[in-house]
Image (tube, rainbow, N blue to C red):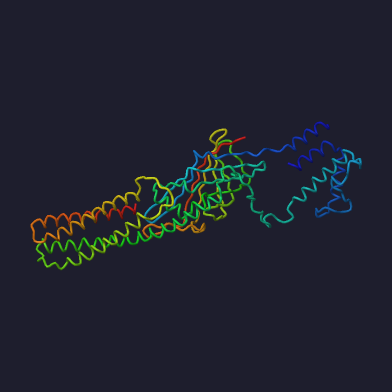
Amino acid sequence: MRLSCLLALAVLCAPGLGRAEDAAAAGLGRDGTAGGDAAVALPGAETPADGISAHALAQRAFLSGVLLAQAEAPSQPAGAQQAPPPSLDFDLLDDAAKKPDAAAQAADAERIDRMVRTRRTMLTLHQGLGIATLASLVGTTVVGQLAFNDKYRGGGDTERFLPWHVGLLITTSALFTTVGLLGVLAPVPYEKHFRWDTANIHKMFMALATAGMVAQLVLGLVTHGLDGQLSQVDLATAHQVIGYATLGAMTAGTVTLFF
Amino acid sequence: MLAVSLALTLLCAAPDQPRNLTVLSEKSRLVFHIVHKLHKIEGVSKGVEGRARVLPDGTAQVQVQAKVADFDSGNENRDAHMKEVVEAAKYPTIVFKGVGAGATLPESGKATVTLKGQLTFHGVTQPLEVPVTLERVDAQHLDAEATFSVSLEAFKVERPELLLVKVDDKMDIELKLSLVEKS
């Protein structure tokens, strides 16, 4: 754009264009570099006091345009030098009114970071122990069924499975309580709004499983206390059904996380 | 003759004005895609801000940002976990700043411009080159779409895990912007 403007000015205001071209050729060496016998001073070197005519100024404008084009022309083959990376020194979204207080933000970030670290530790334990709890509950249910068969389905009432069932029941209850407390007591650093997502469905099933675990403990103790009575079978059956329901709720709560 | 040359000088000397565009947040969105062995996760941020400027020499300067806390994948627990791993309180925004050479805003139809710049996410800045497709909607509005992938580990993001299995490192990001040109 700049060169074309200078050339246009030169054409309009410099009748002696041929003389300007000869001067340019003499001013530039054969290899195209500035120099040579007819050295030409660039515009700006003269002052108004020099009394340079418009014609001479136009000639020099033309020559400076030629020299400018020469200076801008690559002296090496294209691709020999890589263009510098584009400058990213701009900020189109610089809005001082919206910028939050940096000190308050840093303090808040530190507080949240502590909560996050605690939460991550607790929920990692929650996941690992939760899988162990499910496995323990499966064992408790299986051994419980074997004990039920042994007592009420012609197994001979040897009570050989009962100690295992009680032992697994205690282990499962301890794990279940620990896992539940880890989940409930983990800090919540970021606000959450309720929606029916997998996490809340998981919590719903685990709430049902909690009710089942509590009912099982009570029913188990009451059933054992009614040993020899007719009503023991009914309560044992209820204990069995609620046991399977509790296992089902806990399994559903775990599987939900897969979706 | 002198008057003509003066007029020509003024014409040559008058600078072109840069063209300024602003992202309409309510019509724009940033979508991220992450893959876990059990899920494909898609999250949307509707709070996208941005501006673009096309200089007279055809250079386009673009800056777009989104708040990490606005990301919504449909699962509050997952979103909260995502905010934890990207430390949303410390690094609240994801920002792209780029420059494109020889950019022209299409007067009709589509045009493509490649932006070279950097993406700042989780306090880490990485270079990024993004081809952007522009489509003229009307005299003042344009739509812009771009898709690119990033590595979570390159931005020092601890990959979230579920049931002891981590999500994939690659995160695909889609930008769908509605722009208005302001004089």
Q: Residue at x 80, y 48 (%)?
A: A67
Residue A233 picture location, percent across and down = 11, 57
The residue drawn where x is 77% and y is 50% is: A70
The vertical placement of A80 against A3, above or below, is below
Location of residue B85 with respect to B63 vertically, above or below: below
Side of A46 where B45 appears, left or right: left
Establish if A166 lies above or below A183: below
In the foreground, A195 or A70: A195
Q: Residue at x 38, y 60 (%)?
A: A124
Image quarter of the N terminus of chain A:
top right
Q: Nearer the viewer, residue B147 or A186?
A: A186
Residue A125 lies left or right of residue B66; in this view the side is: left
* Residue nearer the viewer, A233 or B111: A233
Q: Is residue A207 visible?
A: yes
The reply, left or right, for residue B149 in relation to residue B107 is left
On screen, residue A32 versus residue B19, left or right, reads right
Q: Is residue A95 visible?
A: no
Horizontal and vertical percent for residue B70? 47, 46
